[in-house]
Image (cartoon, rainbow, N blue to C red):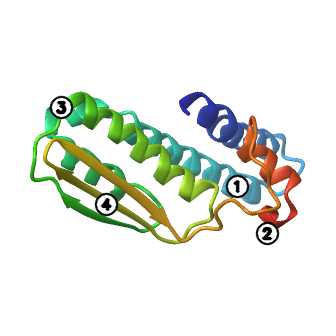
Amino acid sequence: MLRSTLHDEVVPTLAIARHRISAALSGTADTQSHLQWAEMSVGSAIEQLRLMARTLLPSMVSTHGFADAVEYFVVGVKTPVSLRLHLDNVVPQAVELAAYQVLVEAVLNAERHARATTITVDLSTDADTLILSVADNGVGILPECVPGWGWPACVRRSCPAAAN
Protein backbone atom coordinates (compact mmCIF):
# COMPACT_ATOMS: atom_id res chain seq x y z
CA MET A 1 0.00 0.00 0.00
CA LEU A 2 2.72 2.50 0.95
CA ARG A 3 4.74 1.85 -2.19
CA SER A 4 1.76 2.15 -4.52
CA THR A 5 0.51 5.33 -2.83
CA LEU A 6 3.91 6.94 -3.13
CA HIS A 7 4.37 5.77 -6.72
CA ASP A 8 0.84 6.43 -7.99
CA GLU A 9 -0.16 9.52 -6.04
CA VAL A 10 2.51 11.46 -4.16
CA VAL A 11 5.35 11.30 -6.72
CA PRO A 12 3.19 12.33 -9.71
CA THR A 13 1.64 15.14 -7.69
CA LEU A 14 5.06 16.48 -6.78
CA ALA A 15 6.28 16.02 -10.37
CA ILE A 16 3.41 18.21 -11.56
CA ALA A 17 4.38 20.85 -9.00
CA ARG A 18 8.01 20.77 -10.16
CA HIS A 19 6.94 21.06 -13.80
CA ARG A 20 4.70 24.04 -13.04
CA ILE A 21 7.45 25.78 -11.04
CA SER A 22 9.90 25.23 -13.92
CA ALA A 23 7.37 26.67 -16.34
CA ALA A 24 6.85 29.69 -14.09
CA LEU A 25 10.61 30.24 -13.80
CA SER A 26 11.07 30.06 -17.56
CA GLY A 27 8.92 33.14 -17.93
CA THR A 28 7.39 31.91 -21.18
CA ALA A 29 3.86 31.44 -19.86
CA ASP A 30 1.41 32.69 -17.24
CA THR A 31 3.59 32.65 -14.11
CA GLN A 32 0.70 33.21 -11.72
CA SER A 33 -1.30 30.27 -13.09
CA HIS A 34 1.70 27.92 -12.92
CA LEU A 35 2.48 28.92 -9.34
CA GLN A 36 -1.15 28.44 -8.29
CA TRP A 37 -1.13 24.94 -9.78
CA ALA A 38 2.18 24.19 -8.08
CA GLU A 39 0.84 25.41 -4.73
CA MET A 40 -2.27 23.25 -5.14
CA SER A 41 -0.18 20.21 -6.08
CA VAL A 42 2.14 20.59 -3.10
CA GLY A 43 -0.89 20.99 -0.81
CA SER A 44 -2.35 17.79 -2.22
CA ALA A 45 0.94 15.95 -1.70
CA ILE A 46 1.05 17.16 1.91
CA GLU A 47 -2.49 15.84 2.48
CA GLN A 48 -1.55 12.49 0.91
CA LEU A 49 1.56 12.20 3.08
CA ARG A 50 -0.38 13.11 6.24
CA LEU A 51 -2.93 10.42 5.46
CA MET A 52 -0.13 7.93 4.84
CA ALA A 53 1.41 8.86 8.19
CA ARG A 54 -1.92 8.14 9.90
CA THR A 55 -2.06 4.73 8.25
CA LEU A 56 1.46 3.91 9.42
CA LEU A 57 0.74 4.43 13.10
CA PRO A 58 0.22 0.93 14.45
CA SER A 59 2.59 1.99 17.24
CA MET A 60 -0.18 4.38 18.26
CA VAL A 61 -2.30 1.31 18.94
CA SER A 62 0.21 0.11 21.51
CA THR A 63 0.93 3.52 23.05
CA HIS A 64 -2.52 5.18 23.03
CA GLY A 65 -4.86 2.24 22.59
CA PHE A 66 -6.76 0.73 19.72
CA ALA A 67 -9.85 2.97 19.99
CA ASP A 68 -7.80 6.19 20.01
CA ALA A 69 -5.72 5.06 17.03
CA VAL A 70 -8.87 4.25 15.05
CA GLU A 71 -10.49 7.58 15.97
CA TYR A 72 -7.33 9.47 14.99
CA PHE A 73 -7.22 7.71 11.62
CA VAL A 74 -10.87 8.28 10.64
CA VAL A 75 -10.68 11.99 11.48
CA GLY A 76 -8.09 12.39 8.70
CA VAL A 77 -10.13 10.66 6.00
CA LYS A 78 -11.79 12.99 3.45
CA THR A 79 -14.97 10.92 3.17
CA PRO A 80 -17.24 11.23 6.22
CA VAL A 81 -16.84 8.18 8.47
CA SER A 82 -19.44 7.14 11.01
CA LEU A 83 -17.54 5.30 13.74
CA ARG A 84 -19.27 3.05 16.27
CA LEU A 85 -17.03 1.58 18.96
CA HIS A 86 -18.19 -1.02 21.46
CA LEU A 87 -14.93 -2.37 22.82
CA ASP A 88 -15.94 -3.78 26.17
CA ASN A 89 -13.64 -6.81 26.20
CA VAL A 90 -9.89 -7.12 25.84
CA VAL A 91 -8.41 -8.87 22.80
CA PRO A 92 -4.73 -9.59 22.13
CA GLN A 93 -2.71 -6.65 20.86
CA ALA A 94 -1.71 -8.62 17.75
CA VAL A 95 -5.40 -8.86 16.86
CA GLU A 96 -5.83 -5.11 17.36
CA LEU A 97 -2.83 -4.36 15.12
CA ALA A 98 -4.14 -6.64 12.37
CA ALA A 99 -7.65 -5.17 12.66
CA TYR A 100 -6.23 -1.66 12.47
CA GLN A 101 -4.41 -2.46 9.23
CA VAL A 102 -7.51 -4.13 7.74
CA LEU A 103 -9.67 -1.16 8.76
CA VAL A 104 -7.25 1.34 7.19
CA GLU A 105 -7.11 -0.58 3.92
CA ALA A 106 -10.90 -1.03 3.76
CA VAL A 107 -11.65 2.63 4.48
CA LEU A 108 -9.07 3.88 1.98
CA ASN A 109 -10.35 1.46 -0.68
CA ALA A 110 -13.90 2.71 -0.14
CA GLU A 111 -12.68 6.28 -0.50
CA ARG A 112 -10.36 5.75 -3.47
CA HIS A 113 -12.05 3.09 -5.56
CA ALA A 114 -15.74 2.85 -4.63
CA ARG A 115 -16.45 6.57 -4.90
CA ALA A 116 -18.21 6.36 -1.55
CA THR A 117 -19.66 9.50 0.01
CA THR A 118 -20.17 7.88 3.41
CA ILE A 119 -18.35 5.10 5.24
CA THR A 120 -19.51 3.30 8.37
CA VAL A 121 -17.08 1.49 10.66
CA ASP A 122 -18.38 -0.75 13.43
CA LEU A 123 -15.94 -2.18 15.95
CA SER A 124 -17.04 -4.33 18.82
CA THR A 125 -15.84 -7.12 21.07
CA ASP A 126 -17.68 -10.25 22.02
CA ALA A 127 -15.92 -12.32 24.68
CA ASP A 128 -12.42 -12.67 23.21
CA THR A 129 -13.41 -11.79 19.63
CA LEU A 130 -12.96 -8.49 17.82
CA ILE A 131 -15.65 -7.81 15.22
CA LEU A 132 -14.90 -5.27 12.48
CA SER A 133 -17.36 -4.14 9.83
CA VAL A 134 -16.66 -1.50 7.19
CA ALA A 135 -19.54 -0.51 4.90
CA ASP A 136 -19.91 2.26 2.36
CA ASN A 137 -22.39 3.59 -0.17
CA GLY A 138 -19.98 3.26 -3.09
CA VAL A 139 -20.46 1.54 -6.43
CA GLY A 140 -19.11 -1.85 -5.33
CA ILE A 141 -17.87 -4.42 -7.79
CA LEU A 142 -19.89 -3.98 -10.92
CA PRO A 143 -21.15 -7.20 -12.61
CA GLU A 144 -19.42 -6.41 -15.89
CA CYS A 145 -16.04 -6.12 -14.17
CA VAL A 146 -14.02 -9.25 -13.61
CA PRO A 147 -11.62 -9.21 -10.63
CA GLY A 148 -8.08 -10.34 -11.25
CA TRP A 149 -4.44 -9.44 -10.67
CA GLY A 150 -4.10 -5.67 -10.45
CA TRP A 151 -7.86 -5.47 -10.46
CA PRO A 152 -8.54 -1.88 -9.24
CA ALA A 153 -6.32 -0.36 -11.93
CA CYS A 154 -7.75 -2.68 -14.58
CA VAL A 155 -11.30 -1.76 -13.60
CA ARG A 156 -10.61 1.93 -14.07
CA ARG A 157 -9.14 1.30 -17.51
CA SER A 158 -11.29 -1.48 -18.90
CA CYS A 159 -14.68 -1.36 -17.21
CA PRO A 160 -16.83 1.36 -18.80
CA ALA A 161 -19.25 1.48 -15.88
CA ALA A 162 -16.41 2.15 -13.40
CA ALA A 163 -15.13 5.09 -15.41
CA ASN A 164 -18.21 7.22 -14.62
Label 2 vs label 4, nearer the camera: 4
Q: Earlier in the sequence, mark 2 or mark 4?
A: 4
Give neighbour class at mark 2: few <14, some 14-19, many 20+ (Cα, 10 Å): few
**Discs 2, 1 touching: Cβ within 8 Å:** no
Between 160 and 49, the one nearer to me in the picture:
160
Q: For the residues marked 1 and 3, what is the alpha-carbon distance in whole angstroms?
A: 47 Å
Disc 1 versus disc 3: nearer the observer: 3
Residue carrying label 4? 122
Relative to 78, residue 101 above or below: above
Q: What residue does disc 1 label?
A: 37
Q: CA distance from mark 3 to mark 2?
A: 43 Å
- Residue assigned mark 2: 164
Residue at 50% in and 66% down: 136
Label 4 sits on a secondary structure element that is: strand
What SS does tag 3 mark?
loop
Cα distance between the residues tagged 2 and 1: 25 Å
The numbered mark, 2 or 1, whose residue comes first in the sequence reads 1
Of badges 2 and 1, the one in the foreground is 2
Q: Mark 2 and mark 4: span between their CA atoms? A: 29 Å
Q: Specify the amino acid type for callout 4.
A: Asp
